Structure formats: C-alpha cells, structure tokens
Amino acid sequence: MEILTKAVRVFIGNQEILKGMDFNVHDKEFVGIIGPNGSGKSTFLKCVYRVQKPTEGGIFLNGKSLDEMSYRESALQLAVVAQHNCYSFDFDVLQVVLMGRSPHKKILDRDNAEDYAIARHALETVGLAGFEKRSFSTLSGGEQQRVILARALTQQTECMVLDEPTNHLDIKYQLQIMDIVKGLDLTVVAAVHDLNIAAMYCDRLIAVKDGMIVGCAAPEQLLTEKFIYELYGVRTKVNTSENGRINIIYLPQHWRKE
C-alpha cells in the first residue's frame, strides 16, 4: 500500500490547521509523524482515515483518490488504531474484535466461522487468547489497546494508521503495541509522542510544526540536538550506538542552573 498526499489543507472556521501537507509513504514502510502538541499531527491522520475532510488537496491510496472511494472500500485497505476508545455499551472482547469484519460484509450478513477464526487469531497475535468473553470495559488500558489492535487486524488491510495509540500507556504496553505492529509487515503511518520510540521503530520520520512539514528523513538523520530544539524548544543530548541507533536524553532547565 502506498499513500500520497498533495497540498492537504484544513480550515476550522477562519483558522488554518494544516497548511499544505505533501508527502508519500512507500509500500511496507513504517513512517512516524512527530511534532509538538497542536502541530496538526492528529488532524492530518484524521484526514487519511476519513474522520476529517480536507478543505483543499488530495489523499491517494495506491494511486486512487479517497474522494472516489466509498467508506467501505477505504476500510478494506486501511485500518485505524486511535488514542481513545469509549463505548456506550458493555461489549465483550470478541464482539469488539469482530467489528473489524464489518467492511467485508453486506448489511444483513452475520458473522460466520471464518470471521470467528480470524478474530481469534488476531487476539492470539496480540497476546490476548482466552480473553474472548472478558468485558472490554474491565480491561486495563494496555489490554484495551491490544483489543483495538486486534480489531484492526481482523480488517485484513494492507495499511494501518496509528493515531498516538500508546500516549497514555506505561512503557511495557507501549513497547508491546509497537513490537506487534512492527512485526506485521504492513504499511504503517503513526503519530508518535515519544521520540525514542519513534527512533526505535520508524523507518522514516515526518516532522510537523504549525500545520506544515518542517523535516523528513530517517530518525538518525532527522533527530539531531539542533533540530529537536527547533521543533520542541527542548535541549537534548543525542547518543548514537555502534549499530547506528540513537538514544535521546532530555536536559531539564534546572540542570543548567545547578
């Protein structure tokens, strides 16, 4: 799956949130979107997974415009794991995961043996085999996010969008989610809050500030001390290991006063 965006702009009222986003994601590439809060990361991803409609510009999946696709057609190609997942009804885990089969069905189709097999396999993939009858609302935050990831897996798409899915999770669950996604061999676009996690998992990073792309490169090329300060206004120390991996150490203001 390849994703191409051309001059994507979004206005909310008179405020321009996205100011012309141009980039492409290659097949099987894991691309991270980074930037400070309010920079436009989530707004842009919402345009990709069709919660938000761009005011101007175009988004293309494998060369076809989203505007020319039905919602069902795009859902067969692209799955989403978002940051917040609240339900008014108390579904059990298997019911939540089976929701991912909806794009494959007609309106009155019932879940069949194949659907259940796919859903159970997805739960096994995310390490939640045996959780089928558990109530979704009683699970921990990390468990809930793995259930939502399993639901995305049951869509059987070529591409997955992660909209800061680990933002409120402890480090164990952050790494679990990212390890699982990294091993799927899919095209992935992810808004990532933690720069060290972005450096560990992403093939390429796109930096966004004030609704514009201000940098695009591999993590070890983009995440310099100078660039991180320009993007976030934070001083850092960036160390590079023998295998070329980087580790970012944040330098609090009070350290420089001691």
Image (tube, helix red, strand yellow):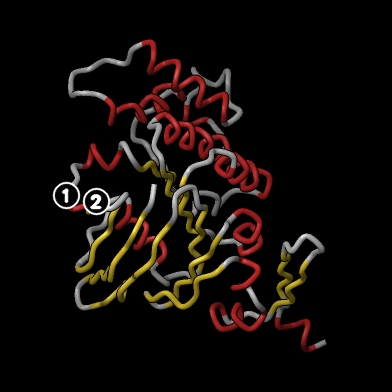
Percent across and percent down for residue 100 are 36, 30
Is residue 136 found left or right of 47 in the rendered image? right
Evaluate whether residue 83 shows in this view: no
Evaluate whether residue 104 shows in this view: yes
Q: Nearer the viewer, residue 109 or 186?
A: 186
Would you name the residue on which mark 2 appears? 64
Q: Are circles 1 and 2 on residues that touch, CB within 8 Å?
A: yes
Give the number of the disc on residue 68: 1
| Identity of the residue drawn at 39% across and 41% down | 86
Instruction: Inspect the image, locate mark 1, and give the three-letter code of the amino acid beneath it.
Output: Glu
| Identity of the residue drawn at 42% across and 29% down | 154
| Identity of the residue drawn at 61% across and 64% down | 195
Q: If the image is split into quadrants, where does the C terminus sit?
A: bottom right
| Identity of the residue drawn at 38% across and 32% down | 155
Identify the image quadrant of residue 130: top right
Q: Nearer the viewer, residue 63 or 152?
A: 63
Q: Residue furthest top?
A: 113
